[in-house]
Every structure is written in C-alpha cells, then in structure tokens.
C-alpha cells in the first residue's frame, strides 16, 4: 500500500502540473470543454487549469501512465560563470543571490558553511557561489531549499535572485513545491517523493 504522503503528492501533482501538451498525449486523456454557453446565450471560457489531470475521471490511472514514461530531463550544471557585465552590475546590486543567501539561511538556523556540507558540490564550487563568483543553477537552489528546510517564501526569493521561478510545467518544480509547502523534509520521505517522479539530479549530499 502506498504511503499517505505519496498519495498526497500524486493528488498535488495532478492538481498543479500544467504541461498540457504532455497530458493531452496520454492515452485515455479526455480534453475537457473549456467553452461554455450561459443561459443568456453568452459564451464563457473556463480557466485552462481545467485541463489538469485532477479533473479527469480516471486521473490516478492516467498519472500512473504518465509516471511510467518519466525520465529526469531537468538536469543542469550546478553553477554557471558570471559574465563581465553581470559581475559589474552585482557591485552595486544589494539583492544578489550571494548577498541575500546568508540572511535567508539564518531563517532556518543555517549558515553558508552548514548548507554547503549538505550539498554534493565541490567545496571550491560552493565557495564560488557563496562569494558571488558563480551563479547557482536552478537545481542547486532547489537542493538548498530542501536540505536547509527553507520556507516557500524564502525559496521563492532565492529563485528570483538567481533569475528563476517555479515552473508548473516542470515535474521537478511541482514535486519540490509540494515538499516545501508540506514541510516534508524527512530525508527518507523526501527521497521517496523525488524517486517516485524520477528526479535524480538535485545536488543533495548523501545522508543530508
């Protein structure tokens, strides 16, 4: 029998995931009618969220079909080098990732040193990110949020400082958002959720 938190993840995913091209390609998916005709004859339109799996009568079966075809396509390097113009801009910008990171980590009683130990990054890479020599890729920001048990609002802030945001058409992003919203930080449970959706490339240190 599937654990309750995995069942809750499935329901959350079905209600939020929004890559409608992939959903519509599932065998058995029935595209809902979005246009409606009111009693007065006016034509209305439902929100596109009605295309999500949760509105399908057999959404659990469709979701299992979807998961069976998953591969981790969200791989990214853990960092990227700053361009010269970015380095120049950062000199006067008070809200860069490296400048805001220590304060945000402090909300969870973490430091840049303790956070670095929970990531599977080379020490020199993490040091470069902390000092602003490198920019973190999205995978790294999401890994920091999970291992440091960040609040959703703090995670959103770090994503913005890095030039990203949560993308509901990304399997990885939807699963991580579920973990953060439910504060599901227990390593075993977290890892089972990630494995359930074949998310394998977050730079999380073993045992963190």
Image (spheres, rainbow, N blue to C red):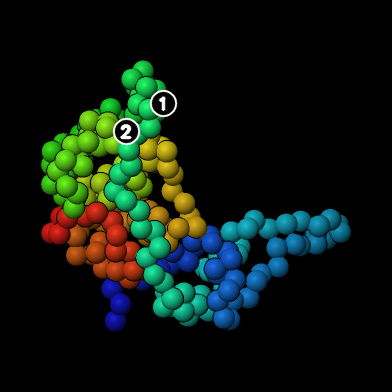
Q: Residue at x 15, y 59 (%)?
A: 206
Residue position marked by numbered label 2 in the rendering: 97
Relative placement, left or right, of 65 versus 111 is right
Q: In what quadrant of the picture does the N terminus appear?
A: bottom left
Q: CA distance from mark 1 to mark 2?
A: 16 Å
Q: Secondary structure at mark 1?
A: helix
For this rendering, which residue is in front, 101 or 108? 101
Q: Position of residue 46 (x, y in %)?
A: 68, 58
Residue sitting at the far top: 92
Residue position marked by numbered label 1 in the rendering: 85
Q: Position of residue 202 (x, y in %)?
A: 28, 56
For this rendering, which residue is in front, 14 or 92? 92
Q: Position of residue 147 (x, y in %)?
A: 21, 50
Q: Residue at x 58, y 74 (%)?
A: 25
Q: Which mark is residue 71?
A: none
Q: In what quadrant of the picture does the C terminus appear?
A: bottom left
Which mark is nearer the camera, 1 or 2? 1
Q: Is residue 60 visible?
A: no
């Amino acid at each position: 029998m599937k654990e309750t938190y995995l069942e809750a993840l499935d329901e959350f995913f079905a209600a939020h995931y929004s890559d409608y091209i992939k959903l519509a390609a599932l065998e058995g998916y029935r595209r809902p009618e979005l246009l409606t005709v009111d009693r007065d004859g006016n034509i209305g339109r439902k929100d596109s969220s009605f295309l999500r799996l949760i509105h399908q009568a057999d959404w659990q079966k469709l979701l299992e079909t979807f998961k069976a075809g998953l591969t981790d396509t969200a791989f990214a390097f853990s960092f990227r080098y700053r361009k010269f113009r970015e380095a120049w801009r950062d000199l006067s910008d008070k809200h860069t990732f490296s400048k805001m990171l220590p304060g945000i980590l402090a909300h969870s009683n973490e430091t840049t040193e303790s956070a670095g130990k929970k990531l599977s990054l080379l020490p020199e890479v993490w040091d470069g990110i902390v000092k602003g020599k490198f920019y973190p890729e999205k995978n790294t920001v999401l890994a920091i949020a999970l291992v440091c048990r960040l609040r959703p609002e703090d995670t959103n802030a770090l994503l913005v400082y890095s030039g990203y945001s949560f993308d509901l058409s990304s399997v990885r992003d939807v699963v991580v958002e579920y973990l953060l919203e439910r504060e599901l930080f227990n390593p075993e449970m977290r890892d089972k959720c990630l494995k359930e959706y074949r998310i394998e490339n977050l730079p999380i240190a073993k045992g963190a």
